Image: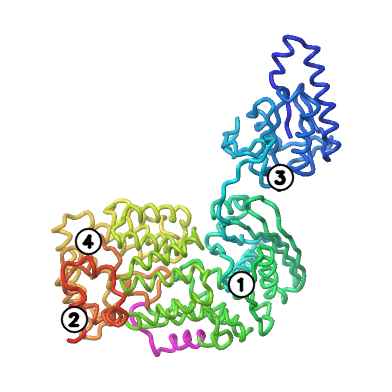
């Protein structure tokens, strides 16, 4: 608490003795008020006093008592909460002390001004008497903070609907001696998220968003993520011993609702998340569905799983083989670990060739077996169902892919990654509006996730909202400069936005992320960006020559290259090439570079991705092609037509039916 006498300098000029008497009277009143409310004066300077209290309520109580002993109109008060440094003499130093002093300076005579941190720390009637007073920029500081004034009566309380609790589980701090144990402390928080996602009463912010807030940034998490509660903690691993401290914080007040410490062997780590998740639910007055653990998990297997999961979530295809090796070792040690098998199935699905369906191959069978093993162990395993959808053929069973991810969402409705998966399948059958709705839900659960933002940007370009897409992906690129997935979508968005110079610069040496991007990838993208500098006719001729070259090749036909050429004025040539490939059994690959976080089964969405030219679906030959790719069957059977059916100048539905009869 910082206090001074308003206009003290002017008083000393008029009557120095009276001014000194006022300071003496103020000191006496402060000492009495501090004694009653557990505080002390730790510094004085002329007419100014600095006090320390054990609680915010104590400081405000002392301010109230002070007004009964001094002339209110002559004193101003500032109160703040924060860390301080204590000197050997008992003086307090630090930024928090300076904030209190700055708040006192902005207070009017007779006013008590407090920071938002103080407002969060008090409850009941006292909190109701803290009236919002706007935001102020503190003198000689970079901060602008919200302030409140202590008033005699409670502020009018607007009638608002009680918000549904939203929990952000932050990455736990690694307090171990070994920095490489970061994966373990992250994993504990990650598994708590997974446990909580298995019930439907608590909304949980996704891992990719919550885990951006580490160290000093943790204080921003609740505000940025719009979370009502924050779960934070720290893990210390020493040898075979595990210690974890956890606290649940009410974001509106900053108060810890509960805190606990846990200690035991690493063998107990796997059960730790369920215990903590149950306590979180109790504190939020919700109930969790009990998740039974059939057997304790081997601690070595659990560590392998955590390492693999961290690699998998980076969305880098080049690294997926490392995750696969770790997960194979994991399930060998813990053969009854369902989520380990499910994650292994998903990783194996992403490692399958993208230029052909690998149905029946040993690699595909191994992925399928892992998913089925997970479901045998846990029929409610949502990740296993999603893995099964990724193992479907690229141009068949479109409805089954959607059904599987819908089933997964019934089991784990608050998992943002499942909503993203659903959006991708809907995108692949042309239902862009429905895909956008799925992403809205994913965005609420994981507002800063690269998968969410990347697909959002791609959908926006497909719907013609290029500027919106650019804003979304630019923000994501600033947040995730090491993500190959975001880098690639940033590049495609720049091309669609007709900004070839920026697209070329994005593929310049040293710019692409170090992991997950090959020299071949960069070369393909730079070549395409260079074509954008040509005139429309020169570009058409260049693409026509490219299609001629592709027609002579025996390699799998890159679908995205053919679609770009069609949009640049070579539509008939492109359709002829696609039909010839299908006639001869030539495989289609989604694109001519390595996919970033994309499975073979997701290839159909390329048909609806914006190329910057005329979309393939605008041409009257598209329904016949869609029939050959299994899409027309899906649309006619489900009556769930693609959005484009309403925007073409030909009988889309009729031609689909006609193509199927043929």
Q: Nearer the viewer, residue 602 or 238?
A: 602
- Asked if the residue under mark 2 is in contact with the one under mark 4, i.e. CB atoms within 8 Å, the reply is no
Query: Of helix, strand and loop, which one carries label 1?
Result: helix
Distance in Å between CA atoms under marks 4 and 1: 45 Å
Distance in Å between CA atoms under marks 2 and 3: 78 Å
Question: How many other residues sit within 10 Å of disc 2, few (<14), some (14-19) or many (≥20)?
Answer: few
Q: Quadrant of residue 375?
A: bottom right
Query: Of helix, strand and loop, which one carries label 3?
Result: helix
Q: Which residue is mark 3?
A: 125
Mark nearer the N terminus (4 vs 2): 2
Q: Quadrant of residue 524?
A: bottom left
Mark nearer the N terminus (4 vs 3): 3
Mark nearer the N terminus (4 vs 1): 1
Q: Is residue 552 visible?
A: no
Q: Is residue 416 left or right of residue 235?
A: left
Closer to the observer: label 4 or label 2? 4
Q: Residue at x 24, y 78 (%)?
A: 626
Q: Which residue is mark 2?
A: 580
Q: Which residue is mark 1?
A: 195
Residue bounds of the magenta highlight: 354-371
Distance in Å between CA atoms under marks 1 and 3: 37 Å
Is the N terminus in the top left, top right, bottom left or bottom right quadrant?
Answer: top right
Distance in Å between CA atoms under marks 2 and 1: 50 Å
Q: Residue at x 69, y 61 (%)?
A: 234
Question: How many other residues sit within 10 Å of disc 3, few (<14), some (14-19) or many (≥20)?
Answer: few
Query: Of helix, strand and loop, which one carries label 2?
Result: helix
Q: Position of residue 239 (x, y in %)?
A: 75, 70
Q: Is residue 274 visible?
A: yes
Q: Tell me the tag on residue 613.
A: 4
Distance in Å between CA atoms under marks 4 and 3: 63 Å
């Amino acid at each position: 608490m910082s206090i001074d006498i308003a206009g003290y300098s002017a008083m000393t000029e008029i009557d120095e003795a009276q001014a000194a008497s006022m300071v003496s009277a103020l000191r006496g009143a402060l000492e009495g008020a501090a004694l009653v409310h557990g505080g002390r004066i730790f510094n004085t300077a002329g007419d100014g006093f600095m006090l320390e209290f054990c609680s915010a309520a104590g400081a405000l109580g002392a301010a109230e008592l002070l007004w009964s002993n001094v002339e209110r109109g002559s004193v101003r008060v500032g109160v703040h909460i924060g860390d301080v440094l204590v000197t050997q003499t008992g003086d307090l130093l630090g930024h928090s002390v300076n904030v209190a002093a700055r708040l006192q300076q902005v207070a009017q005579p007779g006013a008590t001004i407090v920071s938002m941190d103080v407002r969060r720390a008090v409850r009941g009637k006292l909190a109701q008497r803290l009236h919002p007073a706007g935001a102020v920029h503190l003198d000689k500081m970079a901060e602008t903070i919200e302030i409140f004034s202590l008033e005699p009566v409670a502020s009018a309380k607007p009638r608002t609907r009680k918000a549904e609790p939203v929990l952000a589980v932050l990455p736990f701090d690694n307090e171990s001696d070994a920095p490489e144990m970061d994966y373990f402390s992250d994993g504990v928080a990650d598994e708590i998220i997974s446990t909580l996602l298995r019930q439907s009463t608590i909304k949980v912010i996704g891992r990719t968003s919550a885990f951006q807030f580490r160290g000093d940034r943790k204080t921003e998490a609740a505000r940025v993520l719009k979370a009502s509660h924050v779960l934070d903690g720290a893990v210390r691993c020493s040898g075979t011993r595990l210690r974890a401290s956890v606290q649940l914080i009410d974001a509106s007040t900053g108060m810890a609702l509960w805190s606990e410490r846990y200690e035991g062997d690493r063998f107990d780590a796997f059960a730790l998340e369920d215990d903590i998740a149950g306590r979180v639910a109790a504190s939020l007055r919700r109930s969790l569905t009990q998740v039974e653990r059939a057997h304790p998990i081997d601690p070595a297997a659990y560590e392998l799983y955590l390492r693999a999961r961290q690699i998998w979530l980076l969305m880098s295809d080049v690294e997926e083989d490392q995750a696969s090796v770790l997960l194979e070792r994991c399930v060998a040690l813990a053969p009854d670990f369902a989520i380990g098998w499910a994650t292994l199935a998903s990783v194996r699905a992403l490692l399958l060739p993208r230029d052909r369906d690998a149905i029946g191959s040993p690699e595909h069978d191994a992925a399928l077996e892992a998913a089925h093993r997970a479901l045998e162990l846990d029929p409610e395993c949502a990740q296993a169902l999603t893995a099964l959808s990724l193992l479907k053929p690229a141009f068949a069973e479109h409805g089954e892919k959607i059904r599987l991810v819908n089933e997964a969402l019934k089991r784990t409705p608050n998992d943002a990654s499942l909503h993203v998966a659903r959006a991708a399948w809907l995108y692949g059958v042309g239902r862009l509006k429905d895909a956008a709705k799925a992403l809205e839900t994913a965005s609420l659960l994981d507002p800063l996730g690269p998968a969410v933002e990347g697909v959002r940007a791609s959908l926006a370009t497909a719907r013609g909202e290029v500027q919106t897409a650019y804003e979304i992906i630019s923000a994501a690129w600033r947040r995730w400069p090491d993500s190959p997935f975001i880098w690639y979508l940033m590049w495609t968005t720049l091309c669609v936005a007709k900004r070839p110079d920026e697209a070329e610069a994005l593929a310049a040496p040293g710019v692409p992320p170090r992991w997950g991007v090959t020299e071949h990838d960069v070369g393909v993208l730079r070549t395409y960006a260079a074509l954008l500098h040509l005139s429309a006719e020169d570009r058409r001729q260049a693409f026509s020559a490219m299609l001629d070259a592709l027609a002579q090749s025996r390699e799998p036909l890159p679908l995205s290259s053919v679609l770009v050429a069609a949009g640049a004025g070579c539509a008939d040539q492109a359709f002829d090439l696609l039909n010839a490939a299908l006639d001869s059994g030539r495989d289609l690959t989604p694109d001519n570079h390595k996919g970033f976080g994309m499975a073979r089964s997701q290839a159909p969405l390329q048909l609806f991705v914006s190329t910057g030219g005329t979309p393939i679906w605008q041409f009257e030959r598209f329904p016949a092609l869609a029939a050959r790719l299994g899409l027309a069957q899906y649309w006619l059977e489900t009556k769930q037509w693609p959005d484009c059916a309403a925007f073409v100048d030909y009988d889309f539905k009729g031609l689909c039916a006609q193509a199927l009869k043929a």
